Image (spheres, helix red, strand yellow):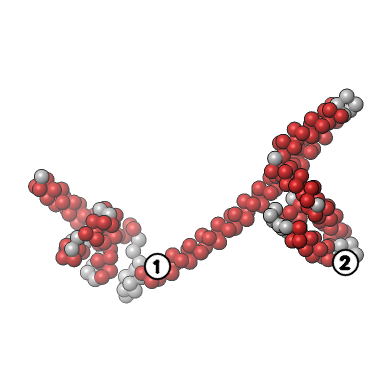
Amino acid sequence: DCYDLLGVTQSANSSEIKKAYYKLSLKHHPDKNPDPESRKIFVKIATAYEILKDEATREKYDYAIALPEEVFYKTAQYYRAYYGHKTDARAVLVGLLVILSGFQYLNQTTRYNQAVAMKKGQKNKDRKVEEDLSKVEEELDLQITGTERPSIWKLIGGPHHSFTLYSRKVAAMVWLLVFGHTRWRSIDDATKEDLVLRCLWEKSNMESYMTEMRKESKRRR
């Protein structure tokens, strides 16, 4: 891909392309670097620059990357019209396949590089989210000595023996899992304290409480 060879994006302007080319030229030009591999790189860089520096050729190149199938069709029509009656059909077919393969390679390379860039960007975003979550967890941590941070399984089935603000938080989380945030906020403090004392994070206590709730609901009907 010409853009990748020069280390620029497809949206780069002429000035950015020229600057990138000269920067790479200083590194890979045969007069600056005698390494044979560097010479090969310079040839590719120079070719890419020749294509991208001219607006007309760059526009055709961008079009070929975006619509390789259409370019292939037009090229096939051209060969058929001007060389079909003179050239061996097999040679024409091979030539067209080479051209199509070239455009497909460019297109796939561009898409691959874009996917890699997006993946790297997503990793950075995920890392940022993890950092933010870590900060929130640190702020919400009650720092109770001898008590580890709760997991959802421990909230539902694990034993807790202290009736502190931490227990209130556990009870609230269990309640939220079962009944929802709105109902928890609507009940009074006395009821909340009662829920804490009931240890609803223990399965048997939650089942007993649910049975009481169903009986109370039937009684009110």
The label shown at residue 32 is: 2
Identify the residue at horizontal 72%, vertical 43% (top origin): 63
Within-10-Å neighbours for mark 1: few <14, some 14–19, many 20+: few
Residue 187 in the image, given as x and y percentages of width and height:
19, 60
Marks 2 and 1 sit apart, C-alpha to C-alpha, by 55 Å
Between residue 151 and residue 60, name the one nearer to us: 60
Identify the residue at horizontal 24%, vertical 61% (top origin): 185
Residue 50 vs 160, above or below: the answer is: above
Residue 128 vs 204, above or below: the answer is: below
Q: Is residue 197 visible?
A: no
Residue 45 in the image, given as x and y percentages of width and height:
81, 56
Between residue 214 and residue 154, name the one nearer to us: 214
Quadrant location of the C terminus in the rendered image: top left
Residue corresponding to mark 1: 137
Residue 141, picture quadrant: bottom left
Residue 175 in the image, given as x and y percentages of width and height:
25, 57
